[in-house]
Image (cartoon, helix red, strand yellow):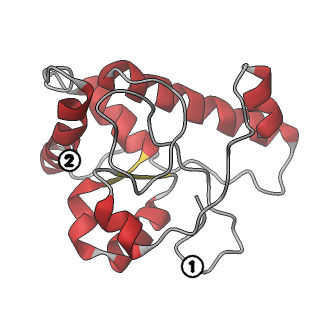
């Protein structure tokens, strides 16, 4: 994955893995996961995070289809309205037929890594385009800055039995 990021001109040097903790979940404005199973693990760990925890594909879909997604005047306000927008979408369309999981490419072929990379890139471009923020990763668990980079979570390795590493 690092080579794909570097090919796009992104610096992979500052990436470090961090254990996802209940405190990080509690302090996050929005928690973005790659799969519904990861989302469920977050919600089991911190039930009050249910309305602000989404898969990346769910978030991208809602932001691309919701007319209210661009209504706030600044980045922080747009992030603050995300939980309500996604909750309304879940209420209005409880059985989304779209695939909401991004497969874990760990241990798979380069073709799978490329496919996953393109799905993540497409979804993050959508999210960034709507929320009006940059594409530099920052640690999940921090509050989104008033302007600046988006949280980008890395897929959890299959063998992990904890909440995962970000």
Is 113 left or right of 40, judged from the image as shown?
right
Front residue of this view, candidates 12 and 152:
12
Q: Quadrant of the C terminus?
A: bottom right
Is 75 left or right of 128, judged from the image as shown?
left
Label 1, label 2: how far apart the Cα atoms are: 25 Å
Q: Is residue 106 above or below residue 125?
A: below
Residue found at x 83% / y 52%? 108
| Residue 98 appears in the picture as rendered | no
Tag on residue 162?
A: 1
Q: Is residue 41 above or below residue 83?
A: below
Q: Position of residue 90 (x, y in %)?
A: 20, 49
Residue found at x 33% / y 27%? 147
Q: Position of residue 110 (x, y in %)?
A: 86, 39
Q: Is residue 157 above or below residue 57?
A: below
Give the class, few, some or many, for how many residues have Cα within 10 Å of label 1's Cα (few <14, many ≥20).
few
Tag on residue 115?
A: none
The residue beneath circle 2 is 83
Looking at marks 1 and 2 on the same chain, the residue that comes earlier in the sequence is marked by 2
Q: Quadrant of the N terminus?
A: top right
Residue found at x 57% / y 35%? 120
Q: Position of residue 35 (x, y in %)?
A: 50, 56
Count up the numbered dots. 2
Front residue of this view, candidates 152 and 123:
152
Is 94 left or right of 127, judged from the image as shown?
left
């Amino acid at each position: 994955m690092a080579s794909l990021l570097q090919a796009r001109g992104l610096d992979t040097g500052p990436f470090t893995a961090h254990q996802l903790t209940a405190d990080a979940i509690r302090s996050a404005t929005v928690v973005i996961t790659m799969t519904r199973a990861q989302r469920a693990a977050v919600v089991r760990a911190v039930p009050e995070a249910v309305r602000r925890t989404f898969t990346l594909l769910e978030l991208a879909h809602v932001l691309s289809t919701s007319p209210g997604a661009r209504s706030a005047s600044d980045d922080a306000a747009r992030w603050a309205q995300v939980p309500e927008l996604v909750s309304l979408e879940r209420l209005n369309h409880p059985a989304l037929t779209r695939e909401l999981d991004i497969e874990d490419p760990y241990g798979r072929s380069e073709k799978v890594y490329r496919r996953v990379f393109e799905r993540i890139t497409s979804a993050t471009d959508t999210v960034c385009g709507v929320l009006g923020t940059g594409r530099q990763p920052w640690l999940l668990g921090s509050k989104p800055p008033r302007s600046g980079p988006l949280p980008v979570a890395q897929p959890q390795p299959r063998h992990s039995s904890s909440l995962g590493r970000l």
